[in-house]
Amino acid sequence: MAPVLDEAAKATGITVRPTYAGTLDAVERIASGEADKAYDAIWLSSNDYLRLRPDTAKKITNETPVMTSPVAVGVRPAAVARLGWDPAKVTWSQLHRAVADGKLTYGMTDPKRSNSGFSALVSVASGLSGAQSALTEEDVAKATPKLKEFFSGQKLTSGSSGWLATAYARRTDVDALVNYESVLLSAPEKLTVIRPADGVVTADYPLTLLTSARPEAKEAAAGSPPGCAPRTPSGGSPGRPCAARWSPGSARPRRSPGTRAASSLPGSRAVADGLLDAYDNTLRRPPARCTCSTPRAPWAASGSTG
């Protein structure tokens, strides 16, 4: 996005200076007040986890979704052929069965640091528990035996979706990659993108103004367009356009057509944190971690008028 931001600065006179952190780490900074006065806006891949924190409600104002990208599974075509799958009909239960039978391995980000990992964890827990509404502690308990089997196939992890994709590209012994659809479609190696039929969680990349933003930043944000159809430079694959603005108290913007939205997000922070703790201490086996430097994932934007 750096070239896009540079072009926007030339066109509007507004400069955006990003600081980087993982999504869940960023939420902690917002909740603790660390972000107050230091930043004007946040730009997470999703505000879903942020909304589970009541202590952040008064810290944000307008949300402008920029694009949408579901968390999906990119599988090497040879593995799809070996498993005899129709990509349009694969479910989380089929993915679990393939992993449990030792026929599929994959990489996924750390859900305690990265939204793609958190979204994948929620999606697979919902799919394997059969949850029909907000994910509950009972749903997590019901799915736990299968979740342990599913995470036995995780061979690669990282704190950032981008770093994970880079590490995966160097490996030939891992069959699949759980990541954003936009990342999977722009991978150097052609992957078959599977969006499990029983539900996925979709990121909408909302640019969100902080209530503590400087007056000039609020003025700049108020003059910005209500959304955009993004383009990704350097041959990357863009997300799907989403152009709805949201303000507290109003109905939230709908997902763009064609995405498979999961309706089973955790019903409370306690359920979400319990699921994350279970992953860290019970569900996963110690994975082979990629040897990369501290991940950098965009989260906060400090704007200034030129």
Image (tube, rainbow, N blue to C red):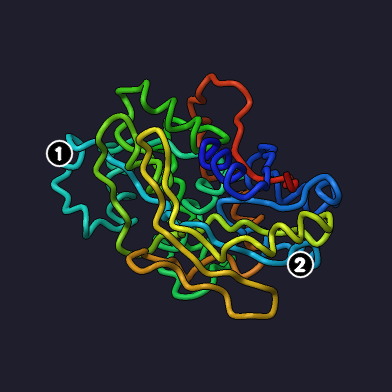
- Residue 132 higher or lower than 17, as above or below: below
* Percent coordinates x, y for residue 167 in the rendering: 44, 25
Report the residue at 28% width, 47% height from top.
193
- Which of the two marks, 2 or 1, is nearer to us in this view? 2
Query: How many residues crowd around disc 1 within 10 Å: few (fewer than 14), some, or many (20 or more)?
Result: few
Report the residue at 67% width, 43% height from top.
16
* Amino acid carrying mark 2 in the image: Ala
Find disc 2 in the rendering and name its residue: 57
Callout 1: SS:
helix
- Residue 73 higher or lower than 92, as above or below: above
* Amino acid carrying mark 1 in the image: Arg
- Place residue 177 in its image quadrant: top left
Find disc 1 in the rendering and name its residue: 82
Measure the C-alpha gap from mark 2 to mark 1. 48 Å
* Percent coordinates x, y for residue 227 in the rendering: 53, 62
* Percent coordinates x, y for residue 229 in the rendering: 43, 57
Report the residue at 54% width, 41% height from top.
7
* Percent coordinates x, y for residue 151 in the rendering: 44, 42
